[in-house]
């Protein structure tokens, strides 16, 4: 898939660039921002991107945020996942298997009030990641990873 196609996949997405400290919206972006290099966030460590898309809705994900971790320099993905609490063991098992590394590269907490899982993971650990990709390619990889995970767990 070309960079332009990645942007087209999320052409109707709602995109905000926000300040990490205040969560204030710095700018609403259109899909052209998805052609930006993911390294943008290494140069703008104080920012994160918030993206809502119908594609994510289809797999039970409310929105996906992406930023660079201030301490470790990883590309962190943060989202809410609409899966039942009783699926915790399958979810944990999938994440441990598909996010390899010496340290746990994810945080998973069930929010009883919202009825969803708050999931954070290091995009760097997802198979296919490289920091030369565009923001759109990164979101495409995130979507593929989450879609495969949800399909695997629901089987």
Image (cartoon, grey):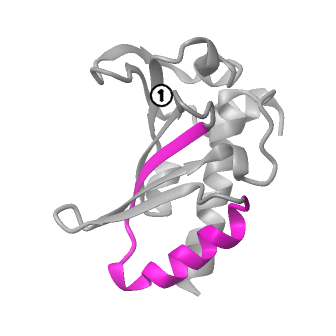
Residue 130 magenta-highlighted? no
| Residue displayed at 56% across by 80% down | 153
| 5 on left or right of 73 | right
Q: Quadrant of the N terminus?
A: top right
Q: Is residue 68 visible?
A: no
Residue at which label 1 appears: 49
Give the extent of the magenta segment: 75-101
Q: How many marks?
A: 1
x, y (%) of residue 108? 43, 63
The answer to whether 3 is drawn above or below residue 78 in the figure is: above
SS at badge 1: strand
Image quadrant where residue 3 sits: top right
Residue 94 magenta-highlighted? yes
Work out whether residue 72 or residue 29 is closer to the camera in this orientation and state it. 72
x, y (%) of residue 145? 66, 58
Image quadrant where residue 114 sits: bottom left
Q: Quadrant of the C terminus?
A: bottom right
| Residue displayed at 79% across by 54% down | 127
Work out whether residue 98 or residue 147 is closer to the camera in this orientation and state it. 98
The answer to whether 27 is drawn above or below residue 2 in the figure is: above
| 92 on left or right of 111 | right
x, y (%) of residue 94? 62, 74
x, y (%) of residue 70? 51, 27
Other-residue count near label 1 (Cα within 10 Å), few / some / many at <14 / 14–19 / ≥20: many
Work out whether residue 14 or residue 128 is closer to the camera in this orientation and state it. 128
| Residue displayed at 68% across by 61% down | 99
Q: Is residue 125 visible?
A: yes
The answer to whether 19 is drawn above or below residue 6 in the figure is: above
């Amino acid at each position: 898939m070309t960079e332009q196609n990645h942007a087209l996949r999320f052409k109707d997405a709602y995109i905000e660039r926000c300040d990490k400290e205040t969560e204030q919206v710095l700018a609403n972006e259109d899909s052209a921002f998805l052609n930006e290099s993911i390294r943008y966030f290494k140069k703008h460590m104080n920012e994160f991107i918030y993206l809502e898309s119908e594609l994510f809705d289809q797999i039970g994900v409310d929105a996906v945020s992406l930023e660079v971790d201030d301490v470790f320099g990883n590309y962190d993905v943060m989202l809410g996942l609409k899966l039942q609490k009783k699926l915790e063991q399958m979810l944990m098992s999938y994440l441990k298997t598909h996010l390899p590394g010496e340290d746990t590269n994810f945080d998973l907490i069930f929010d009883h009030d919202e009825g969803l899982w708050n999931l954070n993971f290091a995009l760097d650990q997802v198979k296919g990641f490289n920091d030369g990709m565009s923001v759109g390619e990164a979101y495409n990889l995130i979507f593929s990873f989450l879609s495969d995970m949800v399909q695997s767990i629901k089987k």
